[in-house]
Amino acid sequence: MRRSTSGHHRRRMSPRIRTAVSVGIAAVAVAATAAAATAETATPPPSTTRTQHVEYFSGADGHPRQTTVPAPKPLAPSEKAAIAAGDGDVTSIVQSGPVGSKLDVVFIGDGYTAAQQEDFHADVRAKWAKISAVEPYATYRGLFNVWAVDAVSNESGVSGDPTKDVVRDTALDSAFFCDGTERLLCVDTGKVESYASKAPAADLVVVLSNSTKYGGAGYNDVSSQVGYDGIATASSDNDQSDQIAVHETGHSLGKLADEYDYGQSGTYSGPEPAQANLSKLSADQMTAQQQKWYRWIGQQSPDGGAVGAFEGGGYYQYGLNRPTENSIMRTLGREFNLPGREGMIAGFYRYASVLSSPVSTHHAVSRGTRIRVTAPASAELTWSVDGRERKAARGKSSVIPRTLGVPADGRAHTVTARATDRTKAVRDPALRKLLSRSLTWHIAP
């Protein structure tokens, strides 16, 4: 949908997120220390220099770049109070289950006026449809709740669109040409965090900036302050912005490293990387030592070719290997490779449960209560009464305790549902532990 670049009002979003996604950039906040002035001098102490590392995608080649930009000033208490008391209406876009049992994605809009909030909601639906069409999102759509948080801007559009001299008054200060880089779409992360806190829960946070221009940014590693892993920005109406967002969730949800290098970055000589998709080891060494992605070596990967060990990654041209030639963690428009897909699914389950139900397990229910549950299509679902499985109920998404076989004998009984995701996309036993859960209801006598 085309956005107005004039002052006409069109739309707005709703925020609250734990992990954030952005068109073209992933960033990590870094604070520098300030030297203290001595008591004897009248010279004021030097101000603290704060910067943020960001990842962005600037060209048609789809390859990421990284840079450092000045961090926004911390919000004053009056600014925080104004945001808390002002706009920030929250709209449910996708409701798959109870908060706490699903991965909650929060979209916040910028450059949408009060009259444009319905436009913003439509943009969220369109953007989420494209993100959730990518595997493994497509298979696991039922694990997500999606929220929109409205941030009302005084002007429509964002600064730096179409040219550097354009300045617009928006709620989150979205701006292209961030630190002189045209496609880098920066925001005031403090304001984003304040709006995100209004959502019922936030596991992944995405800022949609009202623009058709290509650009974005990813700010990671803010979890210590706000409880989620980063903030991502993306243009609302650019066809490539969803790919940038997916790449950024590879960092925040999948805990994956970038698989690209800068060409002139030299040879890596540090310790073995913690990320699952980078290694100093060759394919033969991984297999012999049963390390990293050895379980996938030789398997055909959805991004093309067989899994092996390809030199170059983690910003180094030499000394580090990646699993495949060219996954989405290296170039936009690609698929996650097999180790990356495994990491993403594990990331989904760190926030969402394989089994959820709208029927509370905290209170006893009657024999006639219908108990409903939800689980992914790849999950095996079983039901038990007092610890004994009722095989006839396998795979059922709802049961009634009476028809399940709970007797009316005046005694208390239990009904237990267990779901185990049998997907073949996760092979690591440590990760497979995330793929199983049970719920037990006490049945009133």
Image (cartoon, grey):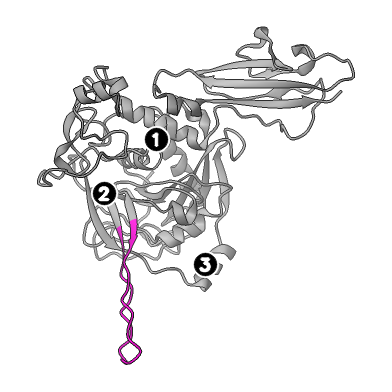
Q: Which residue is mark 3?
A: 80
Label 1 to label 2: alpha-carbon separation? 18 Å
- State the image coordinates of residue 47 (x, y, percent, origin top left): 32, 77
**Which circle's residue, 3 or 1, is located before the other in the chain?**
3
Which structural element holds mark 1? helix
Question: Magenta stretch containing residue 336, yes or no?
Answer: no
Q: Residue at x 61, y 21 (%)?
A: 418
Which structural element holds mark 2? strand
Which quadrant would the C terminus be assigned to in this image? top right
Camera sees residue 115: no
- State the image coordinates of residue 37 (x, y, percent, origin top left): 32, 83
Q: Which residue is mark 2?
A: 56
- Kindly indicate the quadrant of the structure image that contains residue 329: top left
- Is mark 3 in CB contact (under 8 Å) with mark 1? no
Q: Nearer the viewer, mark 3 or mark 1?
A: 3
Give the residues drawn in magenta, as a range: 29-52
**Which circle's residue, 1 or 2, is located before the other in the chain?**
2
Q: Which residue is mark 1?
A: 131
What residue type is disc 2 on? Tyr
What residue type is disc 3 on? Lys
- Kindly indicate the quadrant of the structure image that contains residue 182: bottom left
Report crowding for label 3: few under 14, some 14 to 19, many 20 or more residues within 10 A (C-alpha): some
Report crowding for label 1: few under 14, some 14 to 19, many 20 or more residues within 10 A (C-alpha): some
Task: Name the residue nearer the viewer: 230 or 279.
Answer: 279
Which quadrant would the N terminus be assigned to in this image? top left
Q: Residue at x 57, y 33 (%)?
A: 96
Q: Residue furthest right?
A: 410
Q: Could you tell whether 10 is left or right of 397 in the image?
A: left
Task: Name the residue nearer the viewer: 26 or 87.
Answer: 26
- State the image coordinates of residue 35 (x, y, percent, origin top left): 31, 76
